């Protein structure tokens, strides 16, 4: 009996992880993702970046475009907010986090969800820029001295 319960728990964990990694699964953004709950530590933020960078909106941004990237961008925005919320983070972290938030805001304000035929190229360019800003924040988090 114990093996069956353990197996079920493992299956649930795997299923939840798979759901977390499929941010491009649909147009509707999960309301829970829109609520910002700040991460407790820099390591938490680094871990979250590790999860979102497995999304097609990051891994194949130039080919994928912004189609079904609302959830992904909501998660990226929450990461940026977490990095700026903490008073212990130095400007080496908060500056790239603010840049990331600006990139996401710009992309969200351009009518890219879903992209229209005339905006696809611009929306894809903005998505690639947001992904680059996420990379910059990740590098800053890794390089910053412990706080």
Image (spheres, rainbow, N blue to C red):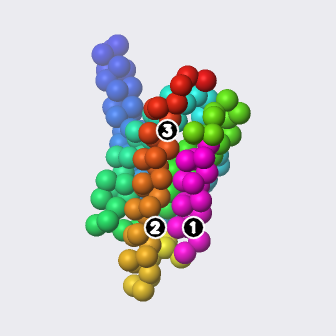
Task: Relative to 145, say whether 22 is above or below.
Answer: below
Which of 86 and 71 lies nearest the eye of the viewer? 86
Is residue 132 toward the left or the right of residue 93 in the image? left
For the residues labelled 1 and 2, the Cα–Cα distance comes to 8 Å
Magenta stretch contains residue 41: no
Name the outermost residue toward the bottom: 118
Which of 62 and 2 lies nearest the eye of the viewer? 62
Residue 86, percent from left and from top: 67, 35
Q: Residue 126, labelled with which disc? A: 2
Q: Residues within 10 Å of mark 2 (few under 14, many from 20)?
A: many
Residue 55, percent from left and from top: 36, 51
Which residue shows up at 35% across the image and 19% down it?
6
Label 2 secondary element: helix
Task: Relative to 119, say whether 129 is above or below.
Answer: above
Q: Do we see residue 141 in this rendering?
A: yes
Q: Which residue in the structure is indicated by mark 3? A: 140
* Span highlighted in magenta in the image: 94-110
Which residue shows up at 61% across the image and 24% down it?
147
Q: First in sequence, mark 3 or 1: give its number.
A: 1
Label 3 secondary element: helix
The picture quadrant where one finds residue 1 is: top left
Q: How many marks?
A: 3
Magenta stretch, overall SS: helix
Q: Which residue in the structure is indicated by mark 1? A: 106
Q: Residues within 10 Å of mark 1 (few under 14, many from 20)?
A: some
Q: First in sequence, mark 3 or 2: give its number.
A: 2
Q: Do we see residue 20 in this rendering?
A: no
């Amino acid at each position: 009996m114990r093996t069956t319960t353990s197996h079920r728990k493992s299956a649930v964990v795997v299923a939840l992880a798979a759901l977390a990694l499929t941010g491009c699964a649909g147009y509707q953004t999960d309301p829970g993702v829109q609520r910002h709950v700040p991460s407790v530590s820099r390591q938490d933020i680094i871990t979250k970046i590790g999860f979102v960078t497995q999304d097609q909106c990051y891994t194949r941004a130039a080919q994928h475009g912004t189609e079904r990237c609302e959830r992904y961008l909501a998660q990226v925005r929450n990461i940026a907010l977490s990095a700026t919320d903490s008073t212990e983070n130095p400007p080496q972290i908060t500056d790239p986090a603010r840049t990331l938030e600006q990139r996401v805001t710009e992309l969200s304000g351009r009518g890219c969800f879903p992209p229209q035929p005339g905006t696809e190229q611009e929306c894809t360019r903005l998505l690639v820029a947001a992904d680059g800003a996420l990379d910059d924040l990740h590098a800053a988090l890794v390089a910053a001295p412990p706080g």
